[in-house]
Amino acid sequence: MSKKQIKVLLVEDNLADARLVNEMLIESGQDNFNFRTVGRLSSALNLLNQEKFDILLLDLNLPDAHGLSGLIEVQTLMPDLPIVVRSGFDDEQLALDAVQSGAQDYLVKGQESGPLLTRALRYAIERKCSEQRLAYLAHYDPLTDLPNRVLFRERLNRAQHRANRHASMIALLFLDLDHFKDINDTLGHDAGDQLLQVVAKRLKNCVRAEDSIAHLGGDEFTIILEDIAHKQDAANIAQKIVEEMAEAFLLNGKDVFVSASIGIAIYPGDGQSPELLIKHADMALYAAKEKGRGNYQFFEEKFNRAVAKRLAMVTFLQHALERDEFVLHYQPQIDPLTKKLLGLEALLRWQHPELGLVLPKDFIHLLEETGLIFSVGEWVLNAVCKQSSIWQAAGLPPTQIAINLSARQFQQVQLAKIIKKILDETGMDPHNLQLEVTESLLISNAEKTISTLCELRDTGIHIVMDDFGTGYSSLNYLHRYPFDTLKIDRSFVQDISGNAETSAIIPAIIALAHSLGLKVIAEGVENEQQLSFLLNLKCEAVQGFLFATPMPSEQCGAWIKNHQEFKEHHTLNAVC
Ligand code: C2E
Ligand code: MG
Ligand code: MG
């Protein structure tokens, strides 16, 4: 098989020397060299502009260039061309300088031979190739072929300098795919990689050729838009990207829908330095996600205050357990027909030293984000089990108590084991415990979640699907999971009075649940009209302000006692 021809350009003004090199290469006979010679640097540059060469063999002493200046000139104009320099001096320092200035090798005239020259040329080509690969890896992400974090920072710095010179504006866009982790978890990492590649392609279609897109890692992308005239220009591009990302992605032969959230910061208004601009674009991205994902958000000064507040909350939360600041309130669940107490739901509150009683909507997400939910979740279960035995010791009948579990808690490998251990230690009867989970749990790692729930249900614990109807509401999953009860979200219950459409949804949900052998509980029952509507549909349990708000344990104990006495009194009256 013939070897690939290597095109060599020799720059040598001494004709005898040039002939010698040519002869050495022919003699060696190892490679198929295509050899051209010129005598001046200017002629070499002319030729290089017209033709592609594989390597340059450059004399350091030419009529129009002396020393390393010729090398540096070629290197600057043709950074990808491998160069071997030749010199009459056997000078170690000069050789080192040459290599540091970009040459791949330094040969001393008179010490060369055919094989040595051939090898030097081949190695120089290989070395240049490796250098280029390393330079590429240092600045690009090989998966998407986009600039990486390092090159992004360099480009942002350069963009900032240009903007200062021309008094123009830059928009920095931070983009993040919503629920990317779920794609990796459910379809595998290859599908995740494939998705990132298609995202990169779609992004390129949304921006101008001169705009710079980068892949920072994971599912994070950035876009630098230079020379924008108005904020609206950035908004238009962000909107275009959001729409592009909303189109289905074909992964593993399936149509998958993924949305993207975008945060935008404008230079110079939103930050005088690249660091600040990045920080603010990131904050805007966070706000876009909070707003409901699949949209874009410009940076606003108030985000700084929100972040500071969040940070302060997290700092306080980190000590809340040891300072014993968490408390549980209990809300009764009632049989709508007999008004009998069926159970209680334990709802977490945080007694903040400065803010007072904080509700879950203001801190559960922080517990989840920081991972504190694991220890706090264990505390909740422990506290519920202990409270149950306190009430029983006080003569109250054993009552089922429901606790809420975050989807994040299912990432604890040992979740089932931890729950069983706490039940064992506290002597709580598993039949008196209910676990409420939400639909968000069901989208990732289904098999593992199902096996954890089955393991728990086998002990006698009841499993409740909470807030039904607010999440994915896919009916497919209901029969795959070991649910005992379905809890209709209070948004449906609240609509009962007026909204005809919702009033039609509730009967459908109850019929579906009953057909799957599930009991139904409705939460957020606030008036008699809602109660009778649910009663007519044979809803098994109701919970809401109509009966009681969530109460601290002592107050709840008294409520249970009163309720019991009231019921006994009425039953007695009815019998008489
Ligand atoms: P959820 O599990 O759906 O709890 C029911 C929420 O509805 C409670 O809000 C309760 O106070 C409220 N509620 C009950 N009846 C009525 C009513 O008639 N009208 C109205 N407007 N609201 C009613 P809360 O206590 O603020 O809890 C909010 C959410 O926080 C809970 O929703 C649950 O998802 C979460 N949460 C509470 N405690 C815990 C916990 O210990 N762990 C975890 N992971 N989440 C918890
Ligand atoms: Mg609940
Ligand atoms: Mg609920």
Image: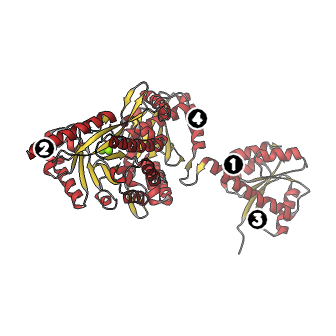
- Mark 4–mark 1 distance (CA, rounded to whole Å): 22 Å
- Mark 2–mark 3 distance (CA, rounded to whole Å): 111 Å
When the figure is inspected, residue 286 is found, relative to residue 102, above or below; the finding is above
2 to the left or right of 477: right
Which residue carries the number 4 mark? 157
For marks 4 and 2, give the one nearer the viewer.
2
In the picture, the disc for residue 37 is: none
- Mark 1–mark 2 distance (CA, rounded to whole Å): 98 Å
Three-letter code, disc 2 = Leu
- Mark 1–mark 3 distance (CA, rounded to whole Å): 22 Å
Which residue carries the number 2 mark? 572
Three-letter code, disc 1 = Pro
Label 1 CB sits under 8 Å from any ligand 1 atom: no
180 to the left or right of 555: right
User: Residue 306 occupies which quadrant of the picture?
Assistant: top left
Counting residues from the start of the chain, the first of labels 1 and 2 encountered is: 1
